[in-house]
Amino acid sequence: MGESDQNSGFPASSLSHVGGHRADRASAGLKLSAPDGRYNQFQRTMLQWSSLHPYNAVHVIHLGKAIEPVRFGERLNHVLSLCGLGNLTIDTKGGYFRFHEGNPECVPRIIDGGGDPLAALHHEMESQLNEVFHFDQPFTPFRFFLLPTDEGSFVGISYFHAVADAESITRLLLEIVRASFDETPQPIRDQTLRPSGEGRLPTEGPLAALRRSWSALARIRAMRSSFRPPRCKITDFRNEFSGYHLDVKETASLLATAREWGLTINDLCLAALLLALAPVTPGRFLRSRPHLSVGCVVNLRNDLAFSKRNYFGLFLGSFAVSHRVEGKISLRELANHVRVQTLAIKKRKLYLAAPLEFMISRFIFGRISREKQCNFYRKSYPLWGSITNMKMDGLCNQFDAAPIRDYHRAVSAGPAMPLVIAVTGVNGHLNFGASYRPTTIPTTEVEGIMDRFIGQLKSAGGQA
């Protein structure tokens, strides 16, 4: 480039490529003069987590139709450019952000599936979780990869999680895939795929916020009686990833059991995770901390005004459930105890208090040493793992450009917890993407946890 790029707003001489993305190192750390908006408390907490280790997420669509790699690369940049979702600048101190116009110039990675495409896919998903986005400079918060097969394609997107939630990313990925089958470039179909500047999480008024904030503080105090996950002895937050699934028959049986027991799949997953974790908690510590706690991520879009529900961004909350570890208990009995907790949380919308919890933790986290940051959450909010679930059929059933055979997800296990299970429902079956930190919970132990977790769900389905 021999002249200034008028679209990007950056001098041509200052542009360079970092990991396939355009970057302006000279502007790192500068405040934004005209930001598009400000990130909410969850997003700003994710920025803080990303200072220790990449806090990314990955989505993959398995298509029953081949995508031509060159066209895929062209069209993904075409869509990002039309949406204005490339060339992002973040003022990390204030949480402000701005998307600059221009072609983001992403280059998709082409993966060789060899003789085992699914194994190659899982390896790439793990790699993407651990690959850095340099957010201290202008960057494109997305990476793409394509794994061709004899019968179709795996199309993947890895993204800087603070930018968007799973629903926004699914719509963006579907838009890009649809564009990849167009003979000529077309305008975007989904007009919501643009930076909105609106990131505020719902509070439902000051009185409701005050009540929930008090409940949040009480919950934080109660959490301190939960058994802590293992100490992080080294500052290595590298993630490993494994994929699991229930087939259509197993999923149908599990759904029938959930209906019979008056439970949700989410309640069963939380209870199964508690049971799966119990064997790795040393009994000698349980007298002083008899509870075990796990978390759950909540989509808050239904709590937004109707006109804002499709905004591109991140609108998530969270909550935790706990149970005493001692003694034997069945999945049904434990799930009923979990259900009592989740019903109370939903009735009082206590998940809307999550922003206060994030704000308090972020305030303390930012004022302690890096060594103490590594174990901050295990002491103050001791969660062993978390469930993040999403049902894809509503979005995927509207897609007619190619048959969608499957959908896979992975979310980084960051400083807040050592294990995250992404539960994805698509085409009548369930996929489970387990991301974990092996320096906190060894791989062999995670394999045992996941085997017990999946075994509990299969066993429950067998009782339908």
Image (cartoon, rainbow, N blue to C red):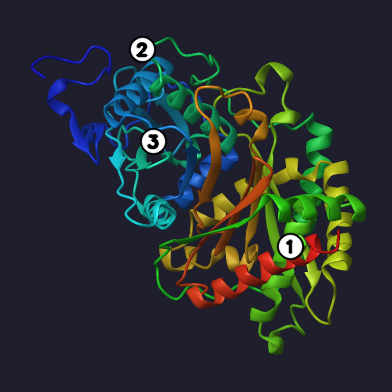
Q: Separation of disc 2 and disc 1 at Cα?
A: 45 Å
The mark that comes first in sequence, 2 or 1, is 2
Residue 457, numbered circle = 1
Label 1 environment density (alpha carbons within 10 Å; few <14, some 14–19, many ≥20): many
Query: In front: 400, or 322?
Result: 400
State if disc 3 and disc 2 touch (CB < 8 Å). Answer: no
Indicate the amino acid at tag 3: Phe
State if disc 1 and disc 3 touch (CB < 8 Å). Answer: no
The residue sitting at 68% across, 57% down in the picture is 295
Height in image: 143 above or below 326? above
Q: Separation of disc 2 and disc 3 at Cα?
A: 20 Å
The residue sitting at 41% across, 21% down in the picture is 181
Which residue is identified by label 2?
185
Query: In front: 59, or 35?
Result: 59
Height in image: 223 above or below 366? below
State if disc 1 and disc 2 touch (CB < 8 Å). Answer: no
Indicate the amino acid at tag 2: Pro
Height in image: 92 above or below 387? above
The mark that comes first in sequence, 3 or 1, is 3
